[in-house]
Image (tube, helix red, strand yellow):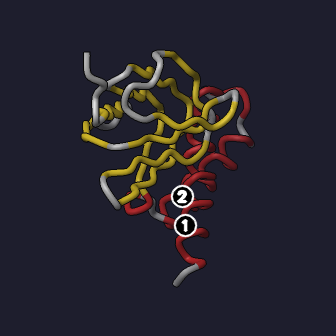
Amino acid sequence: MALPTKLTLNVVTPDHSYSHEVDEVSLPGSEGDFGVRPGHTPFFASLRTGQMSYRQGAETHVLVVSVGFAEVLPDRVSVIAQVAETAEDLDEARAQAGMSRAEEMGAMPHEIDFERARVALLRTLQQLQAESRRGVGH
């Protein structure tokens, strides 16, 4: 049986899902970053907050991911995450507003859904981090 030459990358979040044919994927695993190419040994991993990238030919695309899992198969990588956003999707004003909401929620601990607040704060911090990186080259 011939090894696959491409990977199908599936990314699913509560807000959207998409699929791409890619040459390579890099993910921020909870046990350390890892890369996947076609024919990789199957495994399942939890993801930490960080940058995920995938390569299509000479083009590399970057997403910020958080709170999720990845399933790796020889011909496919499936990412299920609470957050997966491209740099183009990130909005500094929205991130600052999210930070303000998170800080306000901290003043009312009896009314907080802590998991939702934690995810909102992670998303906000990722957006600010990505925005600051994007601003370095401009």
Choose the circle earlier in sequence order: 1 or 2: 2
* Identity of the residue furthest to the bottom in this view: 138
Q: Name above or below for residue 65 compared with residue 43.
A: below
- How crowded pointer 2 is (Cα within 10 Å; few <14, some 14-19, many 20+) is rated as many
Residue 110 x, y percent position in the rendering: 71, 26
The residues tagged by marks 1 and 2 sit, at their Cα atoms, a distance apart of 9 Å
Report the number of numbered marks: 2
- How crowded pointer 1 is (Cα within 10 Å; few <14, some 14-19, many 20+) is rated as some
The residue depicted at 73 percent of the width and 31 percent of the height is 109
Q: Is residue 119 left or right of residue 17?
A: right
* Identity of the residue furthest to the front in this view: 1
Q: Name above or below for residue 66 compared with residue 42.
A: below
Amino acid marked by disc 1 = Glu
Q: Is residue 21 left or right of residue 36?
A: left
Residue behind mark 1: 131
Q: Is residue 110 left or right of residue 134?
A: right
Q: Secondary structure at mark 1?
A: helix
The residue depicted at 53 percent of the width and 37 percent of the height is 35
Q: Of the numbered discs in the image, which one, if any, rests on residue 122?
A: none
- For the residue pair 37 and 63, the one nearer the viewer reads as 37
Residue 81 x, y percent position in the rendering: 46, 30
